[in-house]
Amino acid sequence: MRYSEHQVRSRGLLWCMALMLLMSVVAMAQTGSISGTVRAKDGSALSGANVAVVGTTLGAASDANGSYTIANVPAGAHRVRVSFIGYEETSQSVKVVDGQTTAANFSMSETGVVGDPVVVSASRRVEKLTDAPASIAVVTSSDLAKSSGLTYGEGLQKARGVDVYRTGVDGVGINARGFMTAYSYRMQLMADGKNGMLPGAGLAAGNLLPVARDDIERLETVLGPSSALYGPNAHNGLVNIITKDPRDSRGTTLTLGGGNQDTRIARLRQAGTAGARVAYKINAEYTKATDFIKNDPVGRTASGTTVYEDPDPNLESLRLDGAAYLNLVRDTDLIFSTGYSNTNSIGTTNVGRNQIVDWVYQYYQARLNSRHFFVQGYITQNDAGRTYAIDNVAALVIAGVPKEQAIDRIKFIDDSKRYNFEVQGNVEVQGFRLIGGFNFEDSRPVSKGSYLVDTTGFKIKIKQTGFYGQAERDLGKHFKVVVAGRYDRHDNYDSQFSPRVGLVYKLTGQGAFRFTYNKAFQAPAILQQYLYLPFGAAAGVPIFLRGNGRGLTLANGRQIIPLDVETNETFELGYKGLIGSKLFVDVNAYQSKYDNFISPLTTVGSPFPPISSTVVMMGDGRVTKPEITLTYLNFGQVQIRGFDLGLSYQVSRHVGVWTNFSRIAPEDIADNLENDLNGDKIVNVTEYEALSFNTPKKKYNVGIALSNIFTKGTYASFSMRHVDKYDFISGRHRATQAKRVFNAFQYMDRGPLGGFETFDLNLSYAMQSGVTINVSASNIFNAPLREMVGSPEIRRIVVGEVKYNFNLLP
């Protein structure tokens, strides 16, 4: 059912206002409480432990710091029991006094089974992974600590349902549930509550994000639409990076590493306290490597000299960040943080590759955190440095322009800024757990005409406002119902309402079934609306890359309508939990329907028969000269079905095995006339390729992990990853079974992606002296892997690190 903008605005505002009014009710007074920490024998915090008052329905889950609080406990003697997957159950007696807090701390012994950490991304509150009303993959700091690498994205390669692909030594892309492109916007990236998308182009910052690997507490990946709580960018899902609290990770960590491809790594982390109320952390990370080579010919000069792409394979990155924590009163912190990165790398786009040269990314953030409210404001900005499009520079070199002059002539300018503000509150009233919030985003992209239409006299400013709320309630001992909604306003598009409904059935043991419905939307990104980039010529007709914020008109009178929002409705059924005492199962099946699909860059117009029609108008204005245009189109209806399965089995205290399997496929796109863009009653090749699924139908991995089997502190894992062969079409790039010849050598169709098995090995030894040695080898048999169009073949990567944990400062 479609609602008018007035109906959507009215219903969304009334819903959010009612929820905010309910949240203003004051909770009932407590009789007494029990509070403490849950830790392993080595002193590390255990998050997600079940803490229960025996003989009552009262209980809590320990948070990321191992802390818990159980409120409203009747005065008197009680027994408190703690259980956690992989650890022996323990309990102790306590005496609760009316109006006071009783301390009860626990130290647990390991038994071996793992799989149920605490998460926050599913519901914007702390909850156990098994209880979350969403499909979530989690990588913990413990997982990252047992491996070496250049980026956080490598840690997600074994995660269920997540598509992870390499574009180079340091290039790692992440997607979920289909429709990947060479320049993708479909996964929201967040870090400590911040929007991690670039303020100019609008795609995920990826390696540009100033987050140090040693400071990551965990990575949470929510699979499927998440707009109801996170807004229009969380269309296919989100990756949430959560960093460590310095109060629970005090000390100094120095890491030095290296490997093949001239890899060099240096990291330093210092965290500590200054008095009873102030804490701080500082991170510095430097990486350097030589990328794999892809250097295709582009053309010949007038004298017959062949000109190649000539990318610079030297990769270099510096990341700096820090934070100060001020504890104002109990459970209320004021946090100031900032981060800076300078990156030299290579990035794949829909029309080639960009040489990223001295790209600077910065943020400034202030947060006020309390148990029942959260306020934050932050500024994100970047400077493109001397970044340029490799093929465009090569074209100028062919025309006789020296390379350095060519770079200076067409380098990108990106002085974009984004301002964000958010308020969130939560309260429990009459058994309802209520969350509500408001956020505001003001994007100000600045390219000075280098890749957007912001030429002299025209500035791009986009404001977005969102109101969201969620109500959650337990229905008896086993059922939990979750209802959420978000109302969004966008300067360039109609208002949208994104609902979510979830039902969770919690079993008596550790496990739960869930059923969810989500509707999400994706507003066209800044680049999809405002792109402007000359891109050579064909048969004397100029080629331009253009955003489609205003629509286009061809010489034959055919009109291309402006982009509108894309919607995604998803139904999902899943189970997550422990079967017996050793097998952890995570399985889900889903069905999604996409409407008004936003295509990757697609060619519109041609100087060749049988089309013989060029673009002559953009919106109401004529172009300078008839042109061939590559732009984004808004059309079609696609339905997909998928299935994800994750199993981990603890063979013994020291041996564990796991496997993940995913299958996903769209309906036959060619049979649905909703995908007929030009109205000729058939879905032609161009329309079909604009809706290319770009995702393997099947992928799986299997692995084995050995802990403390040789001596205490040792760890080894060996895994295999399989990816089906699949076609990938994005912009000018093609990788298909047909191997159709296309344009220029650097865009030749070299066959489909995937179709490989690759093997990885991790070795780790944590000594009691505080020294840890890690060695990670990916693609250990050195097979030539093609994981992304426009990128080099990925060969073996071996990285070793020595990490020393000590106390530099008292």
Image (cartoon, helix red, strand yellow):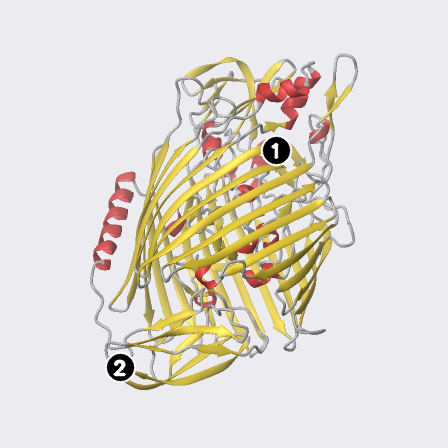
Looking at the image, residue 667 sits to the left or right of residue 471; the answer is: right
Name the residue: 77% across, 49% down. 783
Tag 1: residue type?
Val
In the rendered image, the vertical position of residue 23 relative to residue 89, given as above or below: above
Q: Position of residue 729 (x, y in %)?
A: 62, 37
Does residue 455 appear to the left or right of 704 in the view shown?
A: left
Instruction: Report the residue marked by disc 2.
Output: 97
* Front residue of this view, candidates 737 and 389: 389
Q: Is residue 593 above or below residue 463?
A: below
Mark toward the start of the polypeptide (2 vs 1): 2
Neighbor class of circle 2 (other Cα within 10 Å; few <14, some 14-19, many 20+) is some
User: In this picture, is 713 found above or below 527?
Assistant: below
Instruction: Give the label, 2 or 1, closer to the camera.
Output: 2
Res 245 visible: no
Secondary structure of residue under mark 1: helix
Report how far apart the C-alphas of labels 2 and 1 lie in the structure: 74 Å
Label 2: state its secondary structure: loop
The answer to which image quadrant residue 463 occupies is top left
Q: Name which residue lies at 73% across and 42% down.
A: 793
Quadrant of res 704: bottom right
Q: Which amino acid type is shown beneath numbered disc 2?
A: Val
